[in-house]
Amino acid sequence: MRCYYINRIMVATLLAAMLLVVSCATTGPGGKKSFIMISTDQEVSIGRQMDQQLRKTEKILNDPLWQNYINELGQKIVAVSDRRDLQFQFAVIESDQINAFAAPGGYVYFYTGLINEMNQESELVAVMAHEISHVVARHSIKRLQSIMGISIVLDLALGGSSDNTKALAGTALGIAMSGYSRANETEADNYGTLYMTRAGWHPQGMVAMFGRLQELSGHRQMDLFEMLASTHPATENRIAATKIQIFEMGNLGTKLKKDTPRFQELKKRLPHKPGG
Ligand SMILES: [Zn+2]
Protein backbone atom coordinates (compact mmCIF):
# COMPACT_ATOMS: atom_id res chain seq x y z
CA MET A 1 0.00 0.00 0.00
CA ARG A 2 2.75 2.34 1.02
CA CYS A 3 4.79 1.46 -2.06
CA TYR A 4 1.80 2.09 -4.18
CA TYR A 5 1.43 5.47 -2.57
CA ILE A 6 5.06 6.38 -3.14
CA ASN A 7 4.75 5.31 -6.75
CA ARG A 8 1.78 7.56 -7.13
CA ILE A 9 3.76 10.45 -5.67
CA MET A 10 6.72 9.69 -7.91
CA VAL A 11 4.53 9.60 -10.97
CA ALA A 12 2.89 12.85 -9.96
CA THR A 13 6.32 14.45 -9.44
CA LEU A 14 7.53 13.12 -12.76
CA LEU A 15 4.41 14.43 -14.41
CA ALA A 16 4.93 17.85 -12.87
CA ALA A 17 8.52 17.85 -14.15
CA MET A 18 7.31 16.85 -17.59
CA LEU A 19 4.79 19.66 -17.60
CA LEU A 20 7.60 22.11 -17.08
CA VAL A 21 9.77 20.60 -19.80
CA VAL A 22 7.43 19.88 -22.69
CA SER A 23 4.24 21.79 -22.06
CA CYS A 24 2.75 24.53 -24.16
CA ALA A 25 3.81 24.16 -27.77
CA THR A 26 2.58 26.68 -30.32
CA THR A 27 -0.32 25.08 -32.18
CA GLY A 28 -1.91 27.87 -34.17
CA PRO A 29 -1.98 31.47 -35.38
CA GLY A 30 -1.70 34.32 -32.91
CA GLY A 31 0.57 32.39 -30.54
CA LYS A 32 -2.10 29.80 -29.67
CA LYS A 33 -0.62 27.20 -27.29
CA SER A 34 -1.56 23.64 -26.35
CA PHE A 35 -0.30 21.10 -23.84
CA ILE A 36 1.89 18.69 -25.84
CA MET A 37 3.91 15.87 -24.25
CA ILE A 38 5.09 14.07 -27.38
CA SER A 39 8.24 15.87 -28.55
CA THR A 40 8.80 16.93 -32.14
CA ASP A 41 11.50 14.24 -32.49
CA GLN A 42 9.06 11.55 -31.35
CA GLU A 43 6.38 12.93 -33.62
CA VAL A 44 8.75 12.77 -36.60
CA SER A 45 9.70 9.22 -35.66
CA ILE A 46 6.01 8.19 -35.61
CA GLY A 47 5.42 9.95 -38.93
CA ARG A 48 8.46 8.31 -40.55
CA GLN A 49 7.19 4.85 -39.60
CA MET A 50 3.76 5.67 -40.96
CA ASP A 51 5.39 6.85 -44.17
CA GLN A 52 7.27 3.55 -44.47
CA GLN A 53 4.03 1.58 -43.96
CA LEU A 54 2.20 3.72 -46.48
CA ARG A 55 4.85 3.36 -49.17
CA LYS A 56 4.44 -0.43 -48.97
CA THR A 57 0.74 -0.25 -49.84
CA GLU A 58 0.38 2.88 -51.99
CA LYS A 59 1.96 3.72 -55.33
CA ILE A 60 3.92 6.97 -55.34
CA LEU A 61 3.32 8.81 -58.66
CA ASN A 62 6.39 8.37 -60.85
CA ASP A 63 6.58 11.95 -62.11
CA PRO A 64 9.31 14.22 -60.70
CA LEU A 65 7.58 17.33 -62.10
CA TRP A 66 4.52 16.61 -59.99
CA GLN A 67 6.52 15.67 -56.88
CA ASN A 68 8.57 18.89 -57.20
CA TYR A 69 5.47 20.98 -57.77
CA ILE A 70 3.55 19.61 -54.79
CA ASN A 71 6.63 20.14 -52.65
CA GLU A 72 6.97 23.76 -53.81
CA LEU A 73 3.32 24.51 -53.03
CA GLY A 74 3.68 22.88 -49.64
CA GLN A 75 6.84 24.74 -48.67
CA LYS A 76 5.22 28.09 -49.57
CA ILE A 77 2.38 27.38 -47.14
CA VAL A 78 4.74 26.05 -44.45
CA ALA A 79 6.81 29.24 -44.72
CA VAL A 80 3.85 31.36 -43.57
CA SER A 81 2.49 28.83 -41.07
CA ASP A 82 2.98 28.66 -37.31
CA ARG A 83 5.05 25.50 -37.43
CA ARG A 84 8.57 25.60 -38.79
CA ASP A 85 10.31 23.06 -36.53
CA LEU A 86 9.60 20.26 -39.03
CA GLN A 87 10.97 19.24 -42.40
CA PHE A 88 7.65 18.81 -44.18
CA GLN A 89 7.53 16.21 -46.95
CA PHE A 90 4.87 16.09 -49.64
CA ALA A 91 4.03 13.23 -51.97
CA VAL A 92 1.55 12.52 -54.76
CA ILE A 93 0.04 9.02 -54.67
CA GLU A 94 -1.30 7.47 -57.85
CA SER A 95 -4.84 6.41 -56.97
CA ASP A 96 -8.40 7.23 -58.00
CA GLN A 97 -9.32 8.02 -54.39
CA ILE A 98 -10.47 11.59 -53.90
CA ASN A 99 -8.34 12.05 -50.85
CA ALA A 100 -5.47 13.80 -49.09
CA PHE A 101 -4.17 13.53 -45.57
CA ALA A 102 -1.38 14.50 -43.21
CA ALA A 103 0.56 12.20 -40.91
CA PRO A 104 2.31 13.46 -37.76
CA GLY A 105 5.75 14.94 -38.29
CA GLY A 106 4.85 16.78 -41.50
CA TYR A 107 4.27 13.95 -43.99
CA VAL A 108 1.47 15.05 -46.34
CA TYR A 109 -0.09 13.01 -49.17
CA PHE A 110 -2.27 13.88 -52.16
CA TYR A 111 -4.08 11.33 -54.30
CA THR A 112 -4.20 11.92 -58.06
CA GLY A 113 -7.96 11.25 -57.84
CA LEU A 114 -8.35 14.42 -55.77
CA ILE A 115 -5.97 16.54 -57.87
CA ASN A 116 -7.86 15.56 -61.02
CA GLU A 117 -11.06 17.02 -59.55
CA MET A 118 -9.55 20.41 -58.65
CA ASN A 119 -10.42 23.01 -61.29
CA GLN A 120 -7.83 25.62 -60.33
CA GLU A 121 -4.59 25.83 -58.37
CA SER A 122 -6.11 27.69 -55.42
CA GLU A 123 -8.45 24.72 -54.78
CA LEU A 124 -5.47 22.38 -54.51
CA VAL A 125 -3.67 24.93 -52.33
CA ALA A 126 -6.74 25.04 -50.07
CA VAL A 127 -6.44 21.29 -49.46
CA MET A 128 -2.71 21.74 -48.88
CA ALA A 129 -3.22 24.56 -46.37
CA HIS A 130 -5.92 22.54 -44.57
CA GLU A 131 -3.63 19.50 -44.24
CA ILE A 132 -0.65 21.55 -43.04
CA SER A 133 -2.97 23.13 -40.47
CA HIS A 134 -3.72 19.70 -38.98
CA VAL A 135 0.04 19.31 -38.44
CA VAL A 136 0.42 22.84 -37.03
CA ALA A 137 -2.41 22.21 -34.58
CA ARG A 138 -0.97 18.73 -33.82
CA HIS A 139 -4.45 17.22 -34.02
CA SER A 140 -3.33 13.61 -34.39
CA ILE A 141 -0.70 14.03 -31.66
CA LYS A 142 -3.30 15.43 -29.26
CA ARG A 143 -5.59 12.51 -30.01
CA LEU A 144 -2.75 10.04 -29.51
CA GLN A 145 -2.02 11.62 -26.13
CA SER A 146 -5.61 11.23 -25.06
CA ILE A 147 -6.13 7.64 -26.22
CA MET A 148 -2.76 5.96 -25.65
CA GLY A 149 -2.62 6.46 -21.90
CA ILE A 150 -0.31 8.50 -19.78
CA SER A 151 2.32 5.80 -19.15
CA ILE A 152 3.15 5.25 -22.82
CA VAL A 153 3.20 8.97 -23.51
CA LEU A 154 5.49 9.51 -20.51
CA ASP A 155 7.75 6.71 -21.69
CA LEU A 156 7.92 8.33 -25.10
CA ALA A 157 8.52 11.76 -23.67
CA LEU A 158 11.38 10.41 -21.57
CA GLY A 159 13.20 8.79 -24.46
CA GLY A 160 10.83 6.02 -25.35
CA SER A 161 11.27 2.55 -26.76
CA SER A 162 10.93 1.80 -30.44
CA ASP A 163 8.17 -0.74 -29.73
CA ASN A 164 6.01 2.00 -28.32
CA THR A 165 6.79 4.30 -31.23
CA LYS A 166 5.74 1.50 -33.59
CA ALA A 167 2.47 0.99 -31.73
CA LEU A 168 1.82 4.71 -31.86
CA ALA A 169 2.61 4.85 -35.57
CA GLY A 170 -0.02 2.19 -36.22
CA THR A 171 -2.59 4.05 -34.15
CA ALA A 172 -1.67 7.38 -35.75
CA LEU A 173 -2.17 5.93 -39.21
CA GLY A 174 -5.62 4.75 -38.16
CA ILE A 175 -6.45 8.24 -36.89
CA ALA A 176 -5.17 9.93 -40.03
CA MET A 177 -7.11 7.57 -42.27
CA SER A 178 -10.35 7.66 -40.28
CA GLY A 179 -10.68 11.40 -39.96
CA TYR A 180 -10.53 14.00 -37.23
CA SER A 181 -13.21 15.50 -35.00
CA ARG A 182 -15.50 18.23 -36.25
CA ALA A 183 -13.73 20.77 -34.05
CA ASN A 184 -10.39 19.73 -35.59
CA GLU A 185 -11.76 20.12 -39.10
CA THR A 186 -13.20 23.55 -38.37
CA GLU A 187 -9.84 24.63 -36.95
CA ALA A 188 -7.91 23.29 -39.97
CA ASP A 189 -10.30 25.11 -42.35
CA ASN A 190 -9.84 28.30 -40.39
CA TYR A 191 -6.02 28.19 -40.21
CA GLY A 192 -5.81 26.93 -43.79
CA THR A 193 -7.84 29.85 -45.14
CA LEU A 194 -5.52 32.25 -43.33
CA TYR A 195 -2.30 30.52 -44.44
CA MET A 196 -3.23 30.26 -48.13
CA THR A 197 -4.05 33.97 -48.17
CA ARG A 198 -0.77 34.84 -46.45
CA ALA A 199 1.07 32.75 -49.06
CA GLY A 200 -0.53 34.65 -51.95
CA TRP A 201 -3.55 32.60 -53.06
CA HIS A 202 -7.14 33.81 -53.00
CA PRO A 203 -9.05 32.19 -50.11
CA GLN A 204 -12.05 31.84 -52.41
CA GLY A 205 -10.19 28.68 -53.48
CA MET A 206 -11.22 27.11 -50.16
CA VAL A 207 -14.90 27.80 -50.91
CA ALA A 208 -14.52 26.53 -54.50
CA MET A 209 -12.81 23.34 -53.27
CA PHE A 210 -15.67 22.57 -50.87
CA GLY A 211 -18.15 23.28 -53.65
CA ARG A 212 -16.34 20.80 -55.85
CA LEU A 213 -16.43 18.13 -53.12
CA GLN A 214 -20.12 18.81 -52.60
CA GLU A 215 -20.77 18.18 -56.30
CA LEU A 216 -18.87 14.92 -56.11
CA SER A 217 -20.34 13.65 -52.86
CA GLY A 218 -23.65 12.79 -54.52
CA HIS A 219 -22.21 9.80 -56.30
CA ARG A 220 -19.00 9.03 -54.42
CA GLN A 221 -19.69 8.79 -50.72
CA MET A 222 -16.93 6.76 -49.19
CA ASP A 223 -13.57 7.84 -50.52
CA LEU A 224 -13.77 11.61 -50.45
CA PHE A 225 -11.16 13.87 -48.92
CA GLU A 226 -10.33 12.49 -45.43
CA MET A 227 -13.50 10.40 -45.45
CA LEU A 228 -15.49 13.58 -45.66
CA ALA A 229 -18.88 11.93 -45.39
CA SER A 230 -18.40 10.27 -42.00
CA THR A 231 -17.09 12.77 -39.49
CA HIS A 232 -16.68 16.11 -41.19
CA PRO A 233 -18.92 19.07 -40.46
CA ALA A 234 -21.50 19.27 -43.22
CA THR A 235 -19.90 20.81 -46.28
CA GLU A 236 -22.42 23.64 -46.44
CA ASN A 237 -21.45 24.65 -42.89
CA ARG A 238 -17.78 24.70 -43.87
CA ILE A 239 -18.56 26.85 -46.90
CA ALA A 240 -20.59 29.28 -44.78
CA ALA A 241 -17.88 29.54 -42.10
CA THR A 242 -15.17 30.12 -44.71
CA LYS A 243 -17.22 32.83 -46.44
CA ILE A 244 -17.63 34.64 -43.12
CA GLN A 245 -13.89 34.38 -42.46
CA ILE A 246 -13.09 35.79 -45.92
CA PHE A 247 -15.57 38.63 -45.38
CA GLU A 248 -13.87 39.45 -42.06
CA MET A 249 -10.47 39.62 -43.76
CA GLY A 250 -11.69 42.79 -45.50
CA ASN A 251 -10.11 44.06 -48.69
CA LEU A 252 -7.79 41.39 -50.11
CA GLY A 253 -6.51 43.50 -53.02
CA THR A 254 -6.12 42.20 -56.55
CA LYS A 255 -2.82 40.32 -56.36
CA LEU A 256 -3.97 37.02 -54.87
CA LYS A 257 -3.74 34.04 -57.27
CA LYS A 258 -6.67 31.83 -58.22
CA ASP A 259 -5.01 29.73 -60.87
CA THR A 260 -1.76 29.34 -62.83
CA PRO A 261 -0.95 28.00 -66.32
CA ARG A 262 1.58 25.71 -64.63
CA PHE A 263 -1.14 23.91 -62.68
CA GLN A 264 -3.26 23.45 -65.81
CA GLU A 265 -0.27 22.10 -67.78
CA LEU A 266 0.71 19.70 -65.01
CA LYS A 267 -2.87 18.47 -64.69
CA LYS A 268 -2.68 17.20 -68.28
CA ARG A 269 0.21 14.95 -67.24
CA LEU A 270 -1.78 13.15 -64.55
CA PRO A 271 -2.93 9.62 -65.18
CA HIS A 272 -6.70 9.61 -65.66
CA LYS A 273 -8.93 6.78 -64.68
CA PRO A 274 -10.10 4.66 -67.63
CA GLY A 275 -13.02 6.37 -69.33
CA GLY A 276 -12.62 9.43 -67.03
ZN1 LIG B 1 -9.11 17.71 -42.27
Image (spheres, rainbow, N blue to C red):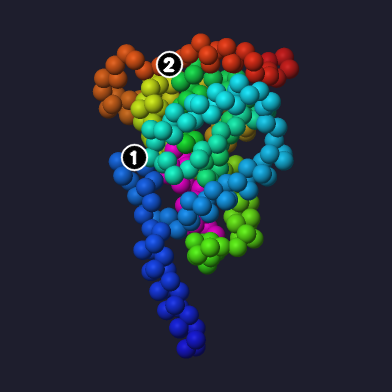
Above or below residue 177? Residue 122 is above
Q: Which residues are magenta?
A: 133-149
Report whether 144 appears left or right of 221: left
Q: Quadrant of the C terminus?
A: top right
* Farthest-out residue, bottom: 2
- Characterize the local packing of mark 1: few (<14), some (14-19) or many (20 or more) Cα atoms within 10 angstroms: some
Above or below residue 166? Residue 197 is above
In the rendered image, residue 135 lying in the magenta stretch gets the answer: yes
- The type of residue carrying mark 2 is Lys
User: Residue, x 33% and y 25% (percent of image)?
Assistant: 246
What secondary structure is found at the residue carrying circle 2?
loop
Task: Decide if residue 235 is in sight here.
Answer: no
Report whether 159 appears left or right of 137: right
Q: Which residue is mark 1?
A: 29
In the rendered structure, find residue 258 and report the number of the disc placed on it.
Answer: 2
User: Residue, x 44% and y 77% (percent of image)?
Assistant: 10
Above or below residue 206? Residue 81 is below
Does mark 2 have its CB less than 8 Å from ligand 1? no
What secondary structure is found at the residue carrying circle 1?
helix
> Does the magenta stretch mainly form a helix, a strand or a loop?
helix
- Characterize the local packing of mark 2: few (<14), some (14-19) or many (20 or more) Cα atoms within 10 angstroms: some
Distance from Cα at disc 2 to Cα at disc 1: 23 Å
In the image shown, does 207 or 270 lie closer to the viewer?
A: 270
